[in-house]
Image (cartoon, coloured by chain):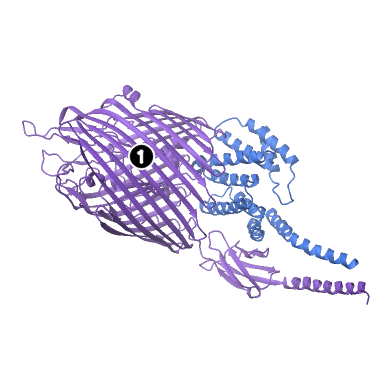
Chain colours: A purple, B blue
Amino acid sequence: MSSSKKIKLYIMKKLAILLILIFVSHVQGQTVINGVVLNEKKEPIVGANIYLEGTYDGGSTGANGVFSFTTTEAGTQTLLVSFLSYESFTMVGDVSYMKDIEVKLKPDVNTLDAVVLSAGTFSAGDNSKVNVLNPLDVVTTASALGDFVGALQTLPGTTTVAEDGRLFVRGGDADETQIFIDGIRVFSPYTPTTNNIPSRGRYSPFLFDGITFSTGGYSAEYGQALSSVLLLNTIDEPDQEKTDIGIMSVGGALGNTQKWEKSSISVNASYINLAPYIALFPDRNDWIKPYEMASGETVFRKKTNAGLIKLYAAFDATNFELIQEDINFEEGLRYKLNNNNLYVNGSYQGVLNSQWSIFGGGSYTRANNKQGVMDQKIYSIDNAFHAKLKLKNRVSNRFKLYMGVEFFSTDFEETYGNDLIEDLDYGYQDNMVAAFTEADIFISKNLAFKAGIRGEYSSVFKDFTLAPRLSLASKISSKSQLSLAYGNFYQNPSSNILKFTQDVKSQNTTHYILNYQYNAERRIFRAEAYYKDYNDLIKYDEEFPSFSSDFSNAGYGYAKGVDLFWRDSYSIKNFDYWLSYSFLDTERDYKNYPAQGQPNFANKHNLSVVGKYWIDKWRSQVGFAYSFASGRTYTNPNESGFLNEKTKPYNSLSLNWAYLISPQKILYASVNNALGFKNINGYQYANTPDMNGDFARRALQPAADQFFFVGFFWTISDDKKSNQLDNL
Amino acid sequence: MKHLIILSTLLFSVYLNAQTNYEKGMQKAFGLWQTNETVEASNLFERIAGAESDNWLPPYYAAQINITSSFGERDKEKLTQKLNKAQDLINDATAISKDNPEIMVLQALLHTAWVAFDGATYGMTLSPKVVELYTKAAQIDPNNPRVAYCKAEWDMGSAKYFGQDTAPFCKDMERSIELFANFKPETPFHPNWGKERAEQVLESCTK
């Protein structure tokens, strides 16, 4: 045989093998895989996708849930079955055994119609399942004047304390509510103010895109709040580069956003001066130096490979001086304030692997407050620090585990002085550590639990507290669900107490909540009944706490009530409205109370109606907000008893109008208490009786019955379209 | 020598065969889509996406089917399911091909689907995102006809909403049609849609 023949033969042989190989693979291609896909109720699922992972071989189920396809693959393969809103099914095995398979898909517990752990919480966000407000509402609610706290006061569970402006939740005092930005505590969330002028949220609403307001029964992640937590999340990624200009009857604002490949920065500055407004519309205060505030905020965000870094910093400076009417001082009470506040917050959140994700962050607050009351001065500096580390383990779609540690540090110093005594320095330092762990367990799409526990140790009074939290939610129909929540909540006494004594311990409440929620197309109804049990509240034996007071944790109280909420933007075209009603029955014995009584910040009935109507033809949104609050208690020393009388009810109707001059120019006007109701927040009685033995009194009225606001907002951006409607 | 040629031809055809798996799959999926079997078409694109993990086209089309079939859907639950799925697919496609103007157009369309469903709720928050996407896509590829056409249609919609003149955007639409005329997709499977709709819109413009 010649060598050429040898080669020929060799090639022939190889060719034969090759042909056989091709043939074999062709024969193997005839494997048929078939079966049926059903749901939990054994009903067929139509349109499910069935395939061998990593191959082209697969099919879809037909009308009766049946599928069948052939494959060229052999041996062990992974069969995948997937369908919208169901958990994917995987089966590993030899293809020859994949015949007449019955696949049962389990509903995905993360879908929209699944049960949500929502007792006690109101969320405002884009696609959140428990949405009650959207971010825009915060700024288009007539009574809110662009203040996110003001908008939240139209929700049930809050009580109207018109002269204060802070959040009073379910019979709780204002300092029982804690505010968090990106999960990190804010130590001084409200702007400083004086007696008859409500304070506002310090931070501009337009840096936030998610707001969760919990009126009870919240997660073990949050502590040091007896009544409520408010969670604000800053925007992860701004939409575009732009400049915002605002010219208002009370000042001006300027904002700019810059974006790069992976990072962005937003800067905001505003200046408020009430002098011109007060010159036009004098109020009940005698202003020596009208209210002036300058503030600046900045957010920097940077995306990393597997996470997001955010830095937020805010600084503001406020000053004013005035003389207020006072029953005990004929010439009035002179008050002066100078306040600087710095807040820095940084956080990182990222994914470690398919199961674990991490969040870490910290905040630093420096609040510098200089008050002058008549001839006395009270200067204070509060340095506070909070750090948090949280891990999340997504064990499965149905079981998620959270755990974390926190550290709080407060250093408070105050100086008191007057003409008679030498300056007095005092203060306290508290370091606190906390740890929490919590699990979300979905038994099915219709039943879920959240169980957690939080431990806190405070260095001031060397006390360890342990607070369990539990909530349960059950879907009772396709549109409604029932939830239960229980929890223990601890909070250290405020700096007003701790600066005089550290020989006290943590105050606590226990919450029991029953919630019903009905969620239909752009309509939502919630009813919530609750009971709160307060224990270990601080008591002292003098009118104001001081070094000579006797302090104890002997205070106690309760709060129970029902909250109702209805929102509908569906029934009437272009009209969106909501109704909130809260019934509250609460009494407590704390602070300087001689007996148990209904505190003056807690009234029985609160009603709020908010409506917004978009008029296409006028390119305008008109809105109103009406609130009614039943009378608040006060003590009339001319009668026997404590907190023995009530003021007349509070009424207010606010109107607003936003007009789009062009897509980027908005004219906005609003008037608070348009009908000019003469509201009375309480009474101040003279310290000493007159000749007839009667204590004279003075009605505590707001500085002004009405407030007018006019603003012009202009946005400059590439798209020439976005505007500041969401700023108003 | 003859056998060698046969052999190499054979081997080549085996190789070709491996190649056309993708082509066959894509062709079949487009066929299903054309006959309105959208679920099957989307399923098949998803399967191809699973097998071709570095090709952005299969997840792109699977997403497109879910987005286009969601327009007109009034049931929020179904809409959310479809659009969330489309968003996942777009994320997959973006992970394979970054800064791709075609995918940006699709992302803008997804946002538009939300705005079309409920303008009052989603308009204010998503509109700037849509505009940003079109602006960025146009910067990357100024001659992409779909970027030009979709942007023009969006601008016209907004102008109508604000009661402004849509005429300037008709010019943009005209320009997009010129771009369509000169557009050559990279492969037969690369995006090449939109011309008919652009012509329709332009027709309504000139009336």
- Residue under label 1: A150
State whether residue B15 is above or below residue A385: below
Answer with left or right where residue A56 lies relative to residue A169: right
Q: How far across and down, in percent of the image, does residue A365 sit?
A: 35, 42
Residue B119 at least partly seen: no
Q: Closest to the observer: A341 or A439?
A: A341
**Residue at image coords 75%, 62%:** B18
Q: Closest to the observer: B17 or A37?
A: B17
| Figure quadrant of the N terminus of chain B | bottom right
Answer with left or right where residue A718 lies relative to residue A708: right
State whether residue B204 is above or below residue A28: above
Answer with left or right where residue A42 lies relative to residue A373: right
Q: How far across and down, in percent of the image, does residue A111 sit?
A: 49, 57
| Figure quadrant of the C terminus of chain B | top right
Examine the image and state in which quarter residue A639 appears.
Answer: top left
Q: Chain of mark 1?
A: A
